[in-house]
């Protein structure tokens, strides 16, 4: 399956490790160089801002989807290719999934996890079969993988973790799947 549009789920904050922003920028440069459209939450702060600004810096295409209630909180990005303002979070997530061919998860908080787990659940239920990548910058998701392994070991999952997720340690690892 060719990836023409990649949804990026990530934080509207930058976190304390500068590698989070650095790898987000690397990912943005990579997407622009491969002419892959960035589909993301529409913000201009944190890791969201870093990845979108990197795509734009290299003249790539960026589509942001943001609920009205978050336009000010996440400082919606006024310079992207297209900004879609929706009524609520559910509509945002649904549109993110519909517009992408695959998704990648970068460091983030509750919202990032919400988007990730909903997409993963939809994948498990065969609502879609889009690839889900996790950029495990500086081991950020190591504890999540350990917990997923526990769920698998306790027989709560229908498929092996490694069949549902592709773990990347740096943005360049994505090239193998494009």
Image: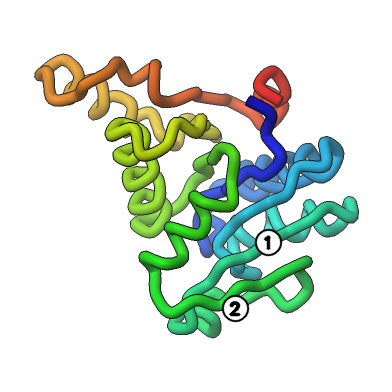
Q: What element carries label 1?
A: strand
Residue 122 position in % (x across, y down): 33, 40
Where is residue 45, by image quadrant? bottom right
Q: What residue did someone put label 2 on? A: 75
Where is residue 75, by image quadrant? bottom right
Q: Do the residues labelled 2 and 1 touch (CB within 8 Å)?
A: no
Examine the rendered structure and indicate whether residue 74 appears above or below residue 49.
below
Residue at the spot 73% in from the left edge and 78% down from the top edge: 78
Residue at the spot 50% in from the left edge and 57% down from the top edge: 11
Local crowd at mark 2 within 10 Å, few (<14), some, or many (≥20)? some
- Asked whether the viewer can see residue 132, the reply is no
Residue 26 position in % (x across, y down): 74, 40
Examine the rendered structure and indicate whether residue 112 appears above or below residue 127.
below
- Report the side of 163 relative to 153 (left or right): right
Q: Which of marks 2 and 1 is nearer the N terminus?
A: 1
Near-viewer residue (102 or 126): 126
Residue 148 position in % (x across, y down): 26, 27
Circle count? 2
- Asked whether the viewer can see residue 128, the reply is yes
Quadrant showing the C terminus: top right
Residue at the spot 69% in from the left edge and 18% down from the top edge: 176
Q: Which residue lies furthest to the left in this view?
A: 154
- Report the side of 15 relative to 121 (left or right): right
Quadrant showing the N terminus: top right
Residue at the spot 86% in from the left edge and 39% down from the top edge: 33
Examine the rendered structure and indicate whether residue 116 appears above or below residue 39.
above
Near-viewer residue (57 or 120): 120
Residue 160 position in % (x across, y down): 30, 15
Q: What residue did someone put label 1 on? A: 63
Near-viewer residue (89 or 152): 89
């Amino acid at each position: 399956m060719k990836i023409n549009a990649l949804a990026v789920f990530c934080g509207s904050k930058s976190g304390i490790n500068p590698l989070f922003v650095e790898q987000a920028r690397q990912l943005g440069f990579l997407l622009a160089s491969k002419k892959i459209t960035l589909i993301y939450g529409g913000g201009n702060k944190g890791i969201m801002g870093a990845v979108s600004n990197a795509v734009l810096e290299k003249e790539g295409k960026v589509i942001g989807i943001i609920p009205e209630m978050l336009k000010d909180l996440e400082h919606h990005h006024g310079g992207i290719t297209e900004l879609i303002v929706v009524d609520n979070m559910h509509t945002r997530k649904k549109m993110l999934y519909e517009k992408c061919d695959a998704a990648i998860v970068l460091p983030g908080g509750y919202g990032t996890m919400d988007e990730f787990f909903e997409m993963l659940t939809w994948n498990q239920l065969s609502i879609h079969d889009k690839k889900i990548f996790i950029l495990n910058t500086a081991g950020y998701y190591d504890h999540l993988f350990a917990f997923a392994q526990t769920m698998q070991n306790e027989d709560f999952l229908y498929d092996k973790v490694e069949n549902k997720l592709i773990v990347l340690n740096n943005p360049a690892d994505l090239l193998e799947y494009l």
